[in-house]
Image (spheres, grey):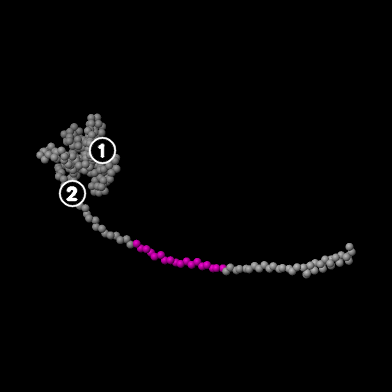
Amino acid sequence: MSYKNFAFVLLGFVLGAYGWYALGPVKTQIERVVERIEIPVIETKTVIKEVKVPTVVIKEKIKEVEVPKIIEKPVIQTVNHTRIIYRPIVDKTEVETLVDKDEVECMSLNIYREANNQSIAGQIAVARVVMNRVMDRRYPADTCSVIYEGPIRESWKTRKDPNLADDKRIYYPIRDRCQFSWYCDGKKDEVINKLNNRAWNTAEDIAYQILAFDKWRGIVEGATHYHADYVSPKWMHTFKRITKIDTHIFYKRQ
C-alpha cells in the first residue's frame, strides 16, 4: 500500500469514529450522590453529689435492779464441843490403849469406801478431811459423828408403832444428803472381807497412823470438803480450792 492510500484509510477511520460518537445513541449519565451525615459530639458530665450520712448514736440504758438478798435459815445442830486431842507417841504398843477401836473402824471404813481406788496420798487426804472437821467447831467433835453426819428418817416398820422404845427404832440416812456419799447413795454396801484384804489393811493402817500419831497433818492444808472431778457441786464456788489429788478436788471455807 502506498503512503497515499494509507492516509486515506486512516482519515476514513477517524471520520467514522467521530460520526459514530456524534450521531450514535444518546448517552445516559448516572450521577451517584453520597450524603455525608455529621454526628454531633454529645458531651456527658458525671456529677457526684456529696451525701452526708448522719451519725447514729445508740444510748444504752442501764436499769438498776435491786436483787433481794436470800437469807437461808441456818440449821442448828447440837454437837459435842468436847474435842479429842490425840498426842503423838513413840511406842506403838500404846496404840491400842490410846485410840478408840470404834473410831479406827469408822475411819478405816470411810477411807475404804471413799478412796480405795485412789493412791495412798488420795486415801490419806480423805482421812485428813475427816480430822479437819473434828477440829472445826462447825462439825461434830469425834470421828464417827463426822463420818455419819447428815439428816435421817425413821424406818416405816418402827414408825408405825408409837409405843416402841427409842433404842429399838431404826433410822436410815436420807439419800444424797450425807457428808460422805457412800453412806447414803442408795446402794447396798458389800460386806468387807477383812482377811487378807490389802485395800482394807491399807485403810486401817492409815487410820491408825492419823488417829494415834496425827500423821500427814498438812497434806490438804485444813481442807474440810472435796468432790470428784467429774461433778460440779454448787458450793464449790464459795470455797477456796486447795489442791487436787487423783480424782478428788479439795476445798476449805473462805
Left or right, 52 with respect to 230, comes to right
Query: Do the residues bearing badges 1 and 2 touch, measured as CB atoms within 8 Å?
Result: no
Assess whether residue 213 is covered by the magenta stretch: no
13 vs 211, left or right, is: right
Q: Nearer the viewer, mark 1 or mark 2?
A: 2
Element type at mark 2: loop
Residue 99: percent from left, percent from top: 17, 36
Q: Which residue of the protein is positioned furthest toward the top in this rendering?
A: 196
Q: Which residue is mark 2?
A: 74
Would you identify the image quadrant in which residue 243 lies? top left
Q: Look at 84% across and 67% down and name the residue there.
A: 11
Q: Which portion, as a residue range, is magenta? A: 41-58
Task: Tell me if mark 2 has few (under 14), some (14-19) or many (20+) residues whose alpha carbon lies within 10 angstroms of its own.
Answer: few
Q: Is residue 111 visible?
A: no
Q: Earlier in the sequence, mark 1 or mark 2?
A: 2
Task: Provide the residue designation for mark 1.
Answer: 115
Q: Is residue 48 magenta?
A: yes
Residue 2, placed above or below residue 143: below
Q: Amino acid at mark 2?
A: Pro
Q: Residue at x 20, y 50 (%)?
A: 72
Amino acid type at image mark 1:
Ala
Residue 243 numbered tag: none
Secondary structure mainly formed by the magenta segment? loop
Q: Position of residue 20 (x, y in %)?
A: 79, 67
Pick the residue in front: 93 or 31. Answer: 31
> Going 57% across and 69% down the picture, which residue do you hit?
40
User: Quick one: SS at disc 1?
Assistant: helix
Does any portion of residue 60 appear in the rendered image? yes
Nearer to me, 153 or 23? 23
Q: Residue furthest left?
A: 163
